Image (cartoon, rainbow, N blue to C red):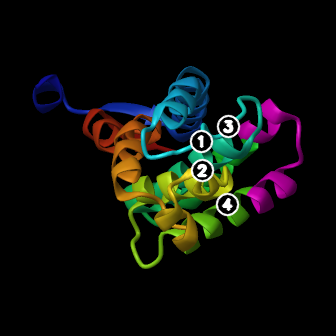
Amino acid sequence: MFTKIFGKKKIKEDKLANIFVNTTLQAVEDGFSDIVGLIKDSPEFIKEPKVEEGDSKFLLIVIAANLKEIPRHLGAHQDNRMINLVITKLSGVFDVEFDKLEAILREYQSYLSRVNHPSNNNLYAMSKAVFYKYDLGQYQEEYFRNMNAPNPLFLKRLDEAMSIFLFNWAQTQEEYQLVE
């Protein structure tokens, strides 16, 4: 409501990149244990899946999916600047070279596209990537295990849980005007 009266607040790309990185990392830190719990408690699995906290697969899935969302919400060139700023900040956080991290994230983005083809929905891609990266198919009943496909009931529940890991671009664009 206030944005209609006073207009949007201006925010610099660098500051938004900090917010993006911090909220994404915080969401993963706070929420991954809930995802592990959801997976381990799912009735669709006949054996309890072995999902370990502490590996980087989940974090990379979430970051890659969020980076894929940026071009959908920002204009040309602004999206590339934001992606580069985010990767630069993540490079500092993880103490890894920009080029190496960028290559890993591009690989994960490609993986997200492949496991969810032909859909472009990143939320579904994240859920499917979690399913396949953690090799959850082996813990399902025989029918789905033989197909190496996720049980749709499990996938729907995981989709709902994964939604908290996507950066809220709609709210950001409603509240802020992005400036260079």
Q: Distance between the residues labelled 2 and 4?
A: 24 Å
**Residue labelled with disc 1:** 47
> Where is residue 90 drawn, in percent x and y?
73, 38
Q: Do the residues labelled 1 and 2 touch (CB within 8 Å)?
A: yes
Instruction: Decide whether residue 92 is among the magenta residues.
Output: yes
Task: Relative to 29, say whether 35 is above or below.
Answer: below
**Residue labelled with disc 4:** 108
Instruction: Say which of 156 and 98 sits in front.
Output: 156
- Identify the amino acid type marked 1: Lys
**Magenta segment, which residues?**
89-104
> Where is residue 21 drawn, in percent x and y?
60, 34
Front label number (4 vs 1): 1
Task: Name the residue rendered at 72%, 33% in the picture.
Answer: 52
First reached walking from the N terminus: tag 2 or tag 3: 3
Q: In which quarter of the image is the N terminus?
A: top left
Instruction: Decide whether residue 97 is among the magenta residues.
Output: yes
Q: Which residue of the protein is positioned furthest toward the bottom in this rendering? A: 118
**Residue labelled with disc 3:** 51
